[in-house]
Image: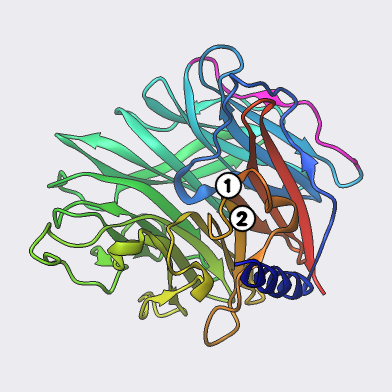
Amino acid sequence: MRAAALLFALLASQAQAGWEWDDALTVNSVQGAAIFPHLESANRQGVAVSGGSVGVVWEDNRDGRPQCYLATKPADAEAFRAETRLSESDCYEPVLVPLEAGRFVAAWEEGGRVRARVLPGGTALQLSKQEAAQVTLAAAGDAVYAAWAEQAGRFHRIVVARLAVKDGTLAVESAQPVEAGNPSDEQGWPALAVAGDGGVTVAWEDRRHRHTVPMVSHSRDGRRFSAPARLSDRKSGSVDGLGAGTGAMRPTLAAWGETGVAAVWLDKRDFLSGYDVYAAFDTGTRRFGRNLQVQDSFGDNMAQWHAKVVGDGGGRMLAVWDDARDGTPDVWLSEWEGEAFGDDVAVPAATGPGAQSDPLATLDDAGFLHVVWLDRDDAAGTRIRYARAVRR
């Protein structure tokens, strides 16, 4: 057992040698044993970089009820500034995307509706007319899109909106459901990406097949969407006589290369070991190809959680997630190498004793990777941690 542990540590250290990491920083200024920060959001879109400034959004209960916060770190600052509260009442699942010159757009759920706001400054705009949740955002240049799960009859359906940004204010230019009719079962947890050609891709969790299947749809203009298609290439059907099919959940999307889109999600097709990280790619054809497993064989026998894909216009792409292959949850990443994903790499400050989980990530225009995660200590409370890396 000791020899195996030493071998694993050696392999992990060799893999880490491909990345050069800055010292990790703490994002949230208020911690405590009874304060619980959450980084969960649709498409795990909680960190963004604009004009060299890093922004992180989260929800915690420091005031006795869930509120959403934003903290930023300017490029020349050594630490994150004190956070700004985004919400007035109970708030959940905030997301963030960059604009230009150190500005951002944040969105969140509050009071049974989804809202968005330009930061710094700006006032909150209600995006949804009906009860809605699980909002996410995507931005490319001047184009900003939002998607959310909105009540339509008995179930929620996915709505996509194009947002106009002018003089620090937001307006809804258009908003329409991906499918016009009321859903036959629940839809939720949308992910968005705006490809290099301006096309919009949306993916979500869908229960129309009586088990959770990630579905995907495309639009050339962000207004008219194609008929939904399965993102998973695993067909529905009972497994050993049980259920309607294996589950898959929490799809994430990222623009990738000149016109491509990458998808990563959690998939339980190997149901005996729990969820695994799977990926599929649209190279610009607006069809996703075969599914590929992301994590390496060291992670095959335990469940993976909180997967997220990130990419850039130059063709870089990687996935992050957490799993407990070392006995406690740690944050891992794997980079796409052209034919397959490479060896899993531990994020140095997000591994080791204790629980490090719930990663968020983004790649900036300069090629830096930014990773955010939760670092839990039962006595001292939970810190939101941040680290930046560059490929050597």
**Alpha carbon separation for disc pair 2 and 1:** 6 Å
What amino acid type is highlighted by mark number 2?
Val
Q: Mark 2 highlights which residue? A: 331
- The answer to whether residue 22 is left or right of residue 203 is right
Q: Position of residue 200 (x, y in %)?
A: 44, 61
The residue positioned farthest toward the top in the image shown:
64
Q: Is residue 253 magenta?
A: no
Q: Position of residue 213 (x, y in %)?
A: 26, 59
Q: From this viewpoint, is residue 32 visible?
A: yes
Q: Is residue 346 above or below residue 172?
A: below
Q: Secondary structure at mark 1?
A: strand
User: Which span is picked out in magenta?
Assistant: 77-89
- Colour treatment of the image: rainbow
Q: Mark 2 or 1 closer to N-term? A: 2
Foreground: 5 or 173?
A: 5
**Quarter in which the C terminus is drawn:** bottom right
Badge 2, how many Cα within 10 Å: few under 14, some, many 20+? many
Quarter location, residue 325: bottom right
Whether residues under marks 2 and 1 lie with C-beta atoms below 8 angstroms apart, the answer is yes
